[in-house]
Every structure is written in structure tokens, then in C-alpha cells.
Amino acid sequence: MTANKQSQIRVNAFFITIFMLWSIALNAFAQEDAKGIRIHRTGKFAGKNVTACDGESWFGLFPTENGFELKQCKVRVVPFRDFCMGDTEEEKTGREVCVEGEVEPLFLIHGMDTLQEGDVETCIKLEKPHNSGIFLFPGQHLSARLPIPGKSAGATRLYALVALGEAVEADPGLGYAVMRHYQIVLNRTQAAAQELTGSQILREYAEFDLEGPPKLIWAGDLDRDGQLDVFMNTYHEYAAREYTLFLSSMAEMGELVKEVASYLVPSC
């Protein structure tokens, strides 16, 4: 092997090493950022499950006449007697999370410095902010369209949340079904060219019934980067809920979104 070839190999190895270290550093930075983000919903919860502190400043995604807006708000955490936990008259182990004003936010988010107050582009929303969500049967999908920042009017990206899997009749006598090999997939398409530019499985489940299936709650551009963000209940059993936020601005290589925060509400 000539000296020139050996030198070139060393140069290539050097740049490959630098690229790998840079990639690791970026991933570690994104993961560290995501760990600092918290989400919550308003309502009454077992005290041990509440991560908000009384008096903290959070961003709330509030419903408006035309959609949703982000606003900073002070969170109140008020003790109450939790009968579900067997509180006596003297005990108040429960915690009610609330904000000032008559309008309740769809959800609260804390620990993300890049959020800004103002209207939020909303693509998929529920008629009632605190509804439990929308379940997609296998084969169903929901479409969402977002304008591309900096492009001409009408330039958009098209998204689709698609449910895959199969519905199997669990008991012919009872007449109900279970979902098997179920997936919620997010697809992104360049609308003008109708070309798929990305796809990601947000959640997959081996099997569940319909007593507490995963449901979509909201989708839009929360972080204002021109890409779709998703908020959903990812739990798949009766009574309990697990609220999960997926953000595009923290997505890593090969992803459309990253799961940045979740909040588990166990059953009583």
C-alpha cells in the first residue's frame, strides 16, 4: 500500500470519527432536552401522580373560537380528600391541578423554552377539549395539512395518521372484537408531488380490546416549525390513561417526531 493511500485512509477515518462523535452529541443533547419537558392535564388526580407544583408557570394550549392558542399561565395545585385512595376526613392526599379563568387548557407543558404565546395552527381537534379522543380502527386514517414556512401560499405538507392491524372477533357469542398487531403510523407527503417523504410508527400494540384503546386528542404545529406535532392517549387498557406528546422540532435523524413527554394517570 502506497503512502498516499495510507494517508487518505487516515484522513477518512478521522472524518468518520468526527461525524460519529457529532451525531452522538446531537442525540444526547436532544434526549437531555426531552427529559426536562413535562406535560399535565387539569383535573383531580392522586397526589403521587402529580408532577406540577403550585405557583409554577406553564404554557397551556387553550381552545379559542377559531382553534387553539398557547398562553402562559400559573398552575394551582389544591389538596382534596381523595376517596379513591381511602382518605379519612383529616387527610387530603389528592391534588387538583387547575389554572385561573373559566377556560381550561387542553393540556399543559413545562420546560420547553422555545414555545411562544399566540395562535397555534391546528389540524385535528376534538369538539370538546376534554373529550377522551378519537380511536382509529385498522384501515382508517386522519389527514392533516400544514403550510410550508417561507414557501408561496398554497405550498403545503400533507400528513396522515394511519391505523394498521386487524380486528378479530374475540367471542362470537358476545359479539365484540379485539385489535391485534395494531400500529399508529404517521406519514408525511409533499402535497404537490404526492410523494411520500417520511413515515414513522408512533405506537404499536400486540393486542387490546375496545374498553380503553389508544386515541388521538390533538394534532397541529405546537412548536411552530411547519411540521406536525401530535398529542394522544397512548394507553390501551381500561380506566388508565397515558397522555403523550410527540414534537417534530426534537425529531432525530430518520424520525418525523420525537416522544418528548408523557403523563400516566393510573386507574383508581
Image (cartoon, helix red, strand yellow):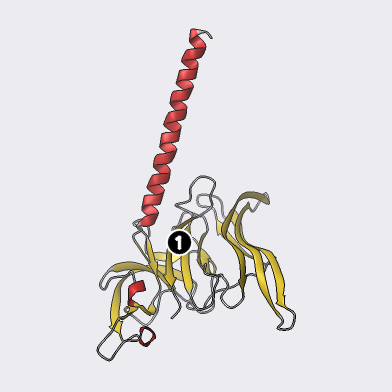
Residue, disc 1 = 222
Q: Nearer the viewer, residue 41 or 177?
A: 177
Residue 86 appears at what percent x and percent y?
35, 86
Residue 159 appears at what percent x and percent y?
60, 58
Looking at this view, name the residue that lies furthest to the bottom. Answer: 89
* 192 w.r.t. 103: above or below: above
Picture quadrant where residue 27 is located: top left
Looking at this view, name the residue that lies furthest to the top. Answer: 2
Q: Nearer the viewer, residue 161 or 223?
A: 161
Residue 121 appears at what percent x and percent y?
49, 64
Q: For the residue labelled by badge 1, is the local secondary structure a helix, a strand or a loop?
A: loop
Looking at this view, name the residue that lies furthest to the right. Answer: 172
**Residue drawn at the location 43% of the way across and 81% of the way down:** 268
* 219 w.r.t. 100: above or below: above
Q: Nearer the viewer, residue 89 or 163?
A: 89
Left/right placement of residue 91 relative to residue 239 reads: left
* Amino acid at dot 1: Leu
Residue 209 appears at what percent x and percent y?
62, 74
Q: Nearer the viewer, residue 175 or 50?
A: 175
**Residue drawn at the location 49% of the way across and 16% of the way down:** 8
Q: How many marks?
A: 1
Left/right placement of residue 109 relative to residue 144 reads: left
**Residue drawn at the location 54% of the way across and 46% of the way down:** 254
Picture quadrant where residue 169 is located: bottom right
Picture quadrant where residue 163 is located: bottom right
